[in-house]
Amino acid sequence: MTGAKQSLYKNKKKRKERDVVKPLILGSLHDYTIWGADNISRARGLDEPFGTWWEVSAHPYCQSPVLNMPGKNLLEVIEENPEDVLGPGLGLHEMLRLAWLDTRDRLSIQVHPQDDNAPANDFGKSESWYILDAEPGATLVAGTNTTDPDVIKKALEDQTLDEYLVKWPVKKGDFIYIPAGMLHALGAGITAIEVGTNSNTTYRFYDYGRKDAAGHERPLHLKESFEVADFSLKPVFVPASDQDHVLADAPQFTVLERFAGEEPVEIETGETYVVLSNMGADTDVTWNGETFPLKALSSMVVPWSAGKVTLKNAHVLESRPKK
C-alpha cells in the first residue's frame, strides 16, 4: 500500500470515530464597488451593480451563511468542529476564500502581502481567477516587465506605470494564478471567480487618478506596497479547455476543473475539505443518500469528515487547500 493510500486509509478509519459534518450549502453576500458590473446581480434577480460577491468566507470581514444550517455561518460551523470540517492539522489559515468579481471598469493595480509580512490580524494572500465570461479584447494585469523597484518608482512619478504592466488577453474558461507580492488587476468586461487564501489585506498601488462618488481620489498604499512587492514574480496562466484538467497546483491550494456527464462522478475529501463551485446550470450533489442542490454560480463546502460526494451533469471547480 502506497504512502498516499495509507494516509487516506487512516483518515477514513479516523472518521468513524468522529462527528460527521454534512455538506455545507453556502449563501452569497454582495459588496458594492465603483468598478462593478451587474452580470452576477442580474443572474440573482437584482438590478444593482455589485462588483464583488463573497461566496466562501470564514474571514472576520465576512462570514458566509450556511443555508442548510439556518442561523449559522461558516466560521461558526468551523469553530464548533474545526477538524471535522477542515481536516486534521488544518486551521483558519488553510480556509480558502472565494468571491465573484464582476467588472464594468478596470480595477486598481494592487498587491497583497505574504504570510511573513501580513498585518498581525490577517494572513498573506495568494489568489487565482477563473474567467467565467469576458468581453472581446478583455485583458487583466499580472506582473511587470521589469524587476527593478526604482524603475517602477520612477514610472509612478512620471505617470508611465502602464508601460511596465504585463497584460494578459483572456476569454471564457481561462485561468491565472497570482502569487502574493505580484502586482495585478482585473480589467474591464470580465466576470471571474476568485479562489484564494483567507485574507482581506489589499494594498492599492495605482488607481489611474480615479475618483470616488464624493469626487476624491482613492488613497494609495505605496509604502506598504513596496514593502511586500516582488517584481520578479510571474503568474501561471492556464488556457481554457473542455476536458477535466488541473488549473492550479500552487503552494497554498489546488484547483481542478471538472465536467461530469450522465455517469456519476465521486469526489473524495481525502486529507482536507473540498470546495465545489458550480460554473454551469443548477445541479444536485448526493451524499449518503441525501440530495443537496448546488445552484448555478454557487458554492458548497464538503467537510473532511463527510468523506465523499457524488455528482453528474455538472461543470464545477474543485478547490482544496494545502497543509
Image (spheres, rainbow, N blue to C red):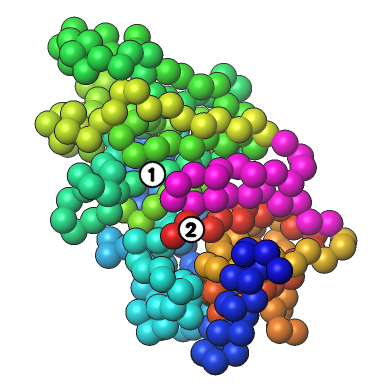
The answer to whether residue 61 is above or below residue 206 is below
Q: Quadrant of the N terminus?
A: bottom right
The answer to whether residue 18 is above or below residue 116 is below
Foreground pick, 191 / 262: 262
* Residue 250 sits inside the magenta stretch: yes
The spot of residue 14 in percent (x, y) is 56, 84
Give the number of the disc on residue 288.
none
Q: Which residue is mark 2?
A: 321
Q: Which residue is mark 1?
A: 126
Is 250 left, or right, of 290 in this rendering?
left
Foreground pick, 276 / 209: 276
Foreground pick, 15 / 168: 15
Kindly indicate the quadrant of the structure image that contains residue 314. bottom right
Where does the magenta region start and end? 241-261
Whether residue 26 appears in this view of the structure is yes
The spot of residue 94 in percent (x, y) is 40, 61
* Residue 21 sits inside the magenta stretch: no
Give the amino acid at mark 2: Pro
Kindly indicate the quadrant of the structure image that contains residue 33. top left
Give the amino acid at mark 1: Ser
**Residue at 72% over, 75% down:** 286
The spot of residue 263 in percent (x, y) is 87, 62
Q: CA distance from mark 2 to mark 1?
A: 12 Å
Where disc 2 sits, the SS reads strand
Q: In terms of sequence position, does the residue under pointer 2 or pointer 1 come before the other?
A: 1
Q: Tell me if mark 1 has few (under 14), some (14-19) or many (20+) residues whose alpha carbon lies within 10 angstroms of its own.
A: many
The spot of residue 306 in percent (x, y) is 60, 79
Is 318 left, or right, of 193 in this rendering?
right
Which residue is most to the left? Answer: 223
**Residue at 41% over, 68% down:** 90
**Residue at 69% over, 72% down:** 309
